Amino acid sequence: QVQVVESGGGLVQAGGSLRLSCAASGSAFRIFAMNWYRQAPGKQREYVAGVDSGDTTDYVDSVKGRFTISRDSAKKTVYLQMSNLKPDDTAVYYCNAEIGPLGTNHVIGDYWGQGTQVTVSS
């Protein structure tokens, strides 16, 4: 079993900043990539940012230049530093981990956290 847990959400005024954290724990495994998604009220879940085991990063255009994703491999943790937040960033943010067994290079599953609420007031 693998568990993924997000934290760091909250209420912030437009223009403010938040840092989200996501930690993976459980039986022996390796992480190939970790990603952030978000889902706003009445909308489908969308990809926000991701980082792979080679530290290659990717962002959706709407957050590029404002959000930074990074990872701490020893802690099996990924962070999302969010700056210059806008009301349109309001959503539940979900962490996704692409995981495989130790000693392999094969992703066997995508694991999701329960989400953390980010609310940006105008």
Image (cartoon, grey):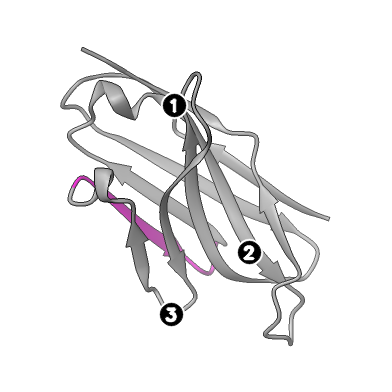
Residue drawn at x 31%, y 45% is 81
Residue type at mark 2: give it. Glu
- For residue 98, which numbered disc appears in the image? 2
Question: In this figure, which residue is indicated by the disc labeled 3?
Answer: 54
Name the residue beneath numbered marker 1. Answer: 91
| Boundaries of the magenta span | 66-75
Distance CA(mark 2)–CA(mark 3): 14 Å
Badge 2 or badge 3: first in the primary sequence: 3
Could you tell whether 84 is left or right of 101 in the image? Answer: left
Q: Residue at x 26, y 45 (%)?
A: 63
**Contact flag, marks 2 and 1 (Cβ < 8 Å):** no
Q: Earlier in the sequence, mark 1 or mark 3?
A: 3
Q: Magenta span has 80?
A: no
71 in magenta: yes
**Magenta portion: prevailing SS class:** strand
Q: Which of 30 and 44 is in front in this view?
A: 44
Residue at the image position 17 percent from the left and 51 percent from the top: 65
From what the image shows, is residue 13 above or below residue 59? above
Q: Is mark 1 on a helix, strand or loop?
A: strand
- The residue nearer to you, when weighing 120 against 60, is 60
Q: Where the N terminus falls, by quadrant?
A: bottom right
Q: Nearer the viewer, residue 8 or 40?
A: 40
Residue 113 rendering spot, x and y as whole percentages: 64, 42
Type of the residue with mark 1: Ala
